[in-house]
Image: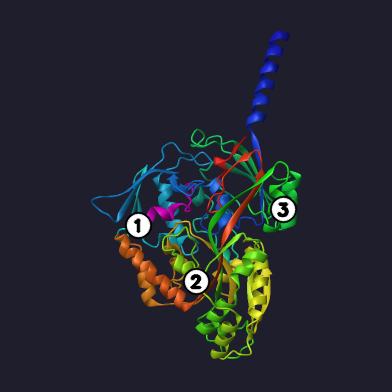
Amino acid sequence: MSGKLLNTVAMGLALALGATQVSAETLNWARAGDSLTLDPHAQNEGPTHTLAHQIYEPLLQRDMTGQIIPALATGWEALEDNPNVWRFTLREGVKFHNGNDFTADDVVYSMERAMMPTSAMKELLTSVKEVRKVDDLTVDFETNGPNPLLVNNLTNLFIMDSDWTEENDIGAPQDIANGETTFAASNTNGTGAFVLDSRAVDEKTVLKQNPDYWGMDEFPMEVTEIVYTPIQSAATRVAALLSGEVDFIQDVPVQDLKRVDEADGLKVVKAAQNRVIFFGMNTAADDIESDDVEGKNPFADVRVRRAMNMAINRDAIQRVVMRGQSDPTNVIMPPFVNGWTEELNAVQPGGIEAAQKMMEEAGYADGFTATLDCPNDRYVNDEAICQAVVGMLGRIGITVNLDSKPKAQHFPLIQNKTTDFYMLGWGVPTFDSHYIFNFLVHTTTDDRGSWNNTGFSDADVDAMIVSLESETDLDARDATIADIWAAVQEAQIYLPVHNQVLNWGMKDGIDFDVQPEDQPHFKFMTFN
């Protein structure tokens, strides 16, 4: 080869490498807690879904504004000749990361898997009678009566490769609540924009851009590598952003917002989140072990629950604990959700004196002792909120022993119903009250009420919840929703605190709006 040709080749190689270096972007991303599993049907939890969305895909997804857009389905309609059937047209030419073709068989398989007893997603499919293949690129969902909102339920239901899943003996979702570990918990094979490269739980997960992604020309796809590092310590997380070790953090601590926003080369992007923070109580047991009252359960008395609700000073939590970064509420439903009203949201007048009087009426003038289970790496200032509430309940005679732990240990307490008093946050990906009712209010059965640790059970309310899945008269449906909320509020089975406000911290060179579900889809991220 001549020297001139060698120089030409070298120059071309250098230009090619240079172009790659300019366009290739590694995103160093951090947040407080890790994904709980890589099995896409095993846990219904925000950070778990966030990581899954980079690797797996649903039929439909919500974009960065919260609007539903096509994903693995390109079209959908309720059939005119049978309103109980929704037909989905699937995207052609899609391949899983291992090269297998995506077909209708994978959709049917994944939906049936998501309806299994160990699935945390089964409540989203309670109206579904059957999912069946029409042809390789067409799938029908038949529901028990017309369900006008079925599409809203599909945005976090991920599609798995049926062949790969069977080959690896992971046909049933991982049973996280009982400590099961499976191949799907640490291995993936999706159709998404990024491929799993390596994973060390609670340490670091590396994803690489999928070169064969069907959406390469439909999304910016400027991120070519993601390095995801959970950093539980707020101070350490902020320090990593300030020093340049990470480029993007989802949860800027409220006490550091100004510091980050005013730092050279950084910015904070804010938005209200579709998530409410609240406390739940075991209201059904005749006696509970975590209190000091013999033979009784103080939480079973609605007057005690109302007194506790009165004692929580939400404005003080907003002002002191959250530094203004919260929206106090009286209902476990964010304003984004169908069914929300200003009347339900308005914090009711009460105060310590009224709460003390109600405690006396309930026979607990001298109070009692109880244990509060609280996560310390899931919600914004979760442990600090719990600490504040401990002090507030102490003013009405309730001595609360706070037990804080990572979410990986906290959530099984709720799922296994082994906690009597606990913090929980709830996002509503369907933007409809039915999602809240099906998980948190309906009597616990094989396919509903999996997060209803309160023991609340009302046959009339259950029937109303089920009726929402097939009511096509939207005015009548909204009236039923209002009736259910009236029953929930009257029973005071939960103690609402506030709706979260999101604060994403990032380098100035990143162009990325806050997504209302706290779901950064990095295929949308751009750099300037």
Residue 156 colored in magenta in the image: yes
Which quadrant would residue 313 be assigned to in this image? bottom right
**Image quarter of the C terminus:** top right
Q: Residue at x 60, y 81 (%)?
A: 352
Which quadrant would residue 276 be assigned to in this image? bottom right
Colouring rule applied to residues: rainbow
Which badge, 3 or 2, comes first in the chain's sequence? 3
Which quadrant would residue 319 be assigned to in this image? bottom right
Residue 424 colored in magenta in the image: no
Mark 2 nearby-residue class (10 Å; few <14, some 14–19, many ≥20): many
Whether residues under marks 1 and 3 lie with C-beta atoms below 8 angstroms apart, the answer is: no
* SS type, badge 2: loop
Does residue 144 appear anywhere in the picture?
no
Q: Residue at x 46, y 72 (%)?
A: 444
The numbered disc on residue 130 is: 1
- Compared across the picture, whether 161 is left or right of 504 comes to left
Which x, y percent locates residue 232?
Answer: 70, 58
The numbered disc on residue 237 is: 3
* SS type, badge 1: strand
Does residue 26 appear anywhere in the picture?
yes
Alpha carbons under labels 1 and 3: distance apart: 46 Å
* SS type, badge 3: helix
Work out whether residue 209 or residue 361 is closer to the camera in this orientation and state it: 361
Picture layout, residue 128 above or below residue 422? above
Alpha carbons under labels 1 and 2: distance apart: 26 Å
The numbered disc on residue 452 is: 2
Which x, y percent locates residue 379?
Answer: 62, 61
**Image quarter of the N terminus:** top right
Whether residues under marks 3 and 2 lie with C-beta atoms below 8 angstroms apart, the answer is: no
- Compared across the picture, whether 444 is left or right of 499 comes to left
> Callout 2, which amino acid?
Asn
Q: Nearer the viewer, mark 3 or mark 2?
A: 3
